[in-house]
């Protein structure tokens, strides 16, 4: 067993050595920072090359959400945490129901704040976690594993596939042959880390960029924005309430006081308030127009 894992790891890009950092422990502070920054500049071009793959994954997500499906991220360690982070940001940013995007991490909530080694090898837990969350046909499950071989993540995606979900896999190393059929593989190749094997660095950053692209682009295509403004945000904090007022003022030209009034009358729904103001209709009619326009503000205003 150990020998097999050794052989798997020795050829992975994410486990290989970066020649420029072989004398890392002898560099000055400035030299170390410059080297890290230089390597970080390789991340965006690597992500850009995977846009065709990301595009197909977004299409899967849009189709799923429009049919009542959900998105699940599953991963271990840093990969799992990044999935949970992206999922947790969707409700306040896009007004999405918490159940719409869910992050599943090996070991559960405790591992979000304290690493627990070994749990990434637990295949049975992966199967149980996927079933516990009720993954079903119509959902999309995105496995996140920078080295691609993480047993927990692989098994979770395999189980999701058995249950009829669409499957996407995000990793930062070339995969010659995936162990089972999946719908889409996204694999930006960012190269060896400055600190060998520390995939929380370049690989983690590439992962974060791609998760941002997946959910943001999907939500835009679902009508969660008006232009480049977040009009489906949940105004549940003082900052978000004031941001909502500013959006209304910028988009419609109303005063601060009027923005506050319309926000109250629309029950804090910025999209509804915009349509109320620009179409000169009440809250009920504005909601009807938005529903008819599939949630797109510009369509409701046309």
Image (cartoon, helix red, strand yellow):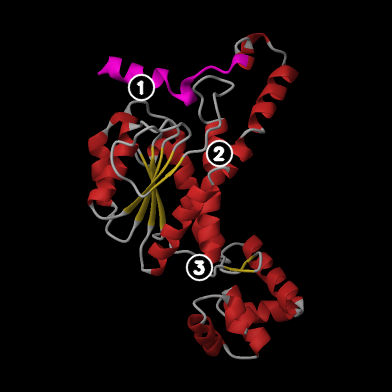
146 left or right of 182?
A: right
When asked about the image quadrant of residue 1, the answer is top left
Residue 192: x and y in percent read: 54, 24
Which mark sits nearer the N-terminus, 2 or 3? 2
Q: Is residue 115 above or below residue 16?
A: below
Helix, strand or loop at mark 1: helix
Q: Residue at x 51, y 40 (%)?
A: 207
Which mark sits nearer the N-terminus, 2 or 1? 1
Q: Nearer the viewer, residue 251 or 21?
A: 21
When asked about the image quadrant of residue 144, the answer is top left
Q: Residue at x 38, y 29 (%)?
A: 116
CA distance separating discs 2 and 1: 22 Å
Residue 274: x and y in percent read: 64, 79
Residue with the most extreme front position: 176
Residue 180: x and y in percent read: 28, 40
Q: Which residues are magenta?
A: 1-19
| Residue denoted by label 2 | 206
Helix, strand or loop at mark 3: loop
Q: Are marks 2 and 1 in contact (CB under 8 Å)?
A: no
- Kindly report which numbered mark, 3 or 1, lies closer to the viewer in this rendering: 1
Label 2 Cα crowd, 10 Å radius (few <14 / some 14-19 / many 20+): many
Q: Nearer the viewer, residue 161 or 56?
A: 56
The C terminus, quarter of image: bottom right
Q: Main secondary structure of the magenta part?
A: helix
| Residue denoted by label 1 | 8
Point out which mark residue 222 bears: 3
């Amino acid at each position: 067993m150990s020998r097999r894992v050794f052989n798997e790891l020795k050829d992975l890009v994410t486990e290989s050595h970066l020649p420029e950092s072989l004398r890392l422990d002898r560099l000055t502070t400035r030299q170390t920072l410059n080297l890290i920054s230089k390597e970080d500049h390789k991340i965006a071009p690597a992500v850009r090359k995977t846009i065709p793959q990301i595009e197909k994954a977004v299409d899967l997500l849009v189709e799923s959400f429009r049919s009542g499906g959900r998105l699940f991220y599953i991963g271990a360690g840093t990969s799992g945490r990044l999935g949970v982070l992206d999922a947790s940001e969707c409700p306040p940013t896009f007004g999405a129901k918490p159940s719409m995007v869910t992050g599943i991490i090996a070991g559960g909530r405790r591992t979000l704040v304290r690493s627990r080694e070994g749990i990434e090898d637990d295949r049975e837990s992966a199967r149980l976690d996927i079933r516990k969350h009720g993954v079903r046909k119509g959902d999309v499950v995105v496995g996140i594993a920078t080295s691609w071989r993480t047993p927990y993540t692989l098994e979770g995606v395999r189980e999701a596939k058995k249950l009829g979900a669409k499957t996407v896999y995000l990793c930062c190393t070339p995969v010659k042959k995936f162990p089972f059929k999946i719908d889409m593989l996204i694999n930006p190749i960012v190269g060896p880390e400055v600190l060998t094997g520390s995939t929380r660095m370049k690989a983690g950053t590439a992962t974060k960029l791609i998760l941002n692209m997946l959910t943001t682009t999907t939500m835009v295509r679902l009508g969660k924005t008006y232009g480049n403004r977040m009009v489906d945000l949940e105004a549940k904090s003082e900052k978000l309430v004031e941001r909502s007022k500013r959006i209304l003022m910028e988009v419609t030209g109303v005063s601060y006081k009027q923005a506050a009034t319309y926000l109250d009358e629309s029950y804090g729904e910025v999209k509804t308030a915009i349509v109320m103001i620009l179409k000169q209709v009440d809250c009920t009619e504005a909601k009807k127009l938005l529903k008819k326009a599939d949630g797109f503000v510009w369509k409701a205003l046309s």
